[in-house]
């Protein structure tokens, strides 16, 4: 038995592979097939990279619609940075029709070296959307920080400073009782608490129910505004732009400036 010298460890011969055992002619065929597969894979990877680069070129030229087309094509073929870019397109909405769930899904596929950036983008999105979701924002900022994104540190600190100490573990009994009696202000507060998860489990469907109660009981302008945003974004209720506009219009009529501004942004005429 052969040994490795001074240490006297027995040397065990590596088992022969199927290629090594093959006859010379068969071996040449197998190696040729492997080489051909590698060449095809490399060619396909280069083609996908070229598609992604076309997207970058269009983006630099300000042609966002064209950039979206090429990012989507490359992303669907597995290009990781194209998936990241496509997610951003969906969140921006102008060239992709605006689809938050698609944007989140694609950004979550971003490459490890860029995933921190994806978390930063998602955190900012959930902070500045029509109905901010600070709990989701915190989750994504923390994810980004864990992966080394330094830009997310201050953003997370700001959210925790404004929300962390203010969050209660339960709803004050007086508020709960008043809401159950139909008091519009208490119903509205319950809606906000359910939407943010402050003192209760976060539940957009329950939030919408309380906002509707507040709106119907006391013609509360802010409640109509929240309902309009929820119909527009599909939070807690199926998305319905016509219903959103009606709610925003009612809120505007009752004096809510945010609802009025949103109607202008949606180009809704009186």
Image (cartoon, rainbow, N blue to C red):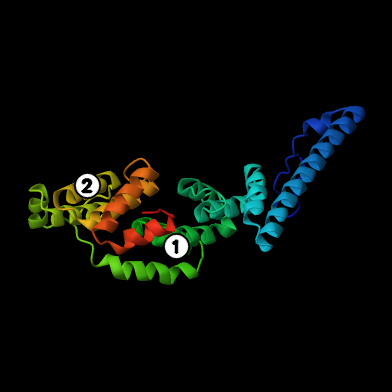
Q: Secondary structure at mark 1?
A: helix
Query: Which mark lies nearer to you, 2 or 1?
Result: 2
Q: Quadrant of residue 20?
A: top right
Image marks 2 and 1: residues in contact by CB distance under 8 Å: no
**Residue 255 % position (x, y):** 25, 62
How crowded is the residue under tag 1: few (<14 C-alpha within 10 Å), some, or many (20+)? Answer: many
Quick one: label 2 or label 1, which is nearer the N terminus? 1
Residue 74 image offset from top left, x and y in percent: 67, 46
Q: Is residue 80 above or below residue 149?
A: above
Estimate the x, y position of residue 97 in percent, counting from the top left: 52, 48
Of residue 122 and residue 129, the one placed in the foreground of this image is 129
Report the front residue among 34 and 19. Answer: 34
Is residue 198 in view from this perspective? no
Residue 60 in view, yes or no? yes
Relative to 94, say whether 26 is above or below. Answer: above
Residue at the limit of the structure toward the front, as seen here: 270
Residue nearest the viewer, comparing 229 with 110:
229
**Mark 2 neighbour class, 10 Å CA radius: few under 14, some 14 to 19, many 20 or more:** many
Q: Is residue 131 left or right of residue 84?
A: left
Query: On the rendered image, what quadrant is the C terminus found in?
Result: bottom left
* Image side of residue 49 versus residue 266, left or right: right
Q: Nearer the viewer, residue 262 or 195?
A: 262
Question: Which circle marks residue 212 in the picture?
Answer: 2
Instruction: Find residue 168 and report its image quarter.
Output: bottom left
Name the residue carrying label 1: 124
**25 over 197 or under it: above or below:** above
């Amino acid at each position: 038995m052969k040994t490795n010298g001074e240490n006297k460890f027995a040397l065990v011969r590596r088992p022969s592979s199927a290629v090594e055992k093959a006859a010379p002619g068969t071996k040449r065929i197998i190696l040729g097939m492997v080489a051909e597969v590698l060449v095809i894979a490399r060619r396909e990877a280069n083609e996908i990279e070229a598609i992604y680069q076309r997207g970058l070129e269009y983006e630099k030229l300000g042609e966002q619609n064209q950039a979206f087309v090429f990012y989507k094509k490359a992303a669907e073929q597995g290009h990781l940075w194209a998936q990241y870019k496509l997610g951003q397109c969906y969140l921006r909405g102008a060239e992709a029709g605006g689809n938050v769930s698609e944007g989140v899904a694609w950004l979550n596929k971003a490459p490890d070296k860029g995933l921190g950036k994806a978390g930063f983008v998602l955190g900012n999105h959930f902070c500045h959307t029509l109905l901010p979701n600070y709990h989701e924002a915190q989750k994504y900022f923390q994810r980004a920080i864990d992966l080394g994104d330094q830009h997310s540190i201050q953003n997370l600190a700001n959210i925790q400073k404004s929300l962390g100490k203010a969050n209660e573990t339960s709803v004050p009994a007086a508020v709960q009782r008043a809401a159950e009696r139909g008091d519009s202000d208490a119903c509205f507060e319950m809606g906000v608490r359910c939407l943010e998860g402050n003192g209760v489990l976060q539940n957009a469907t329950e939030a919408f129910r309380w906002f509707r109660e507040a709106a119907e009981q006391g013609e509360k302008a802010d409640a109509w505004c929240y309902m309009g945003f929820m119909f527009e974004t599909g939070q807690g209720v199926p998305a319905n732009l016509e219903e959103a506009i009606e709610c925003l219009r009612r809120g505007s009529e009752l004096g809510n400036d945010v609802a009025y501004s949103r109607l202008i942004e949606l180009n809704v005429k009186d």
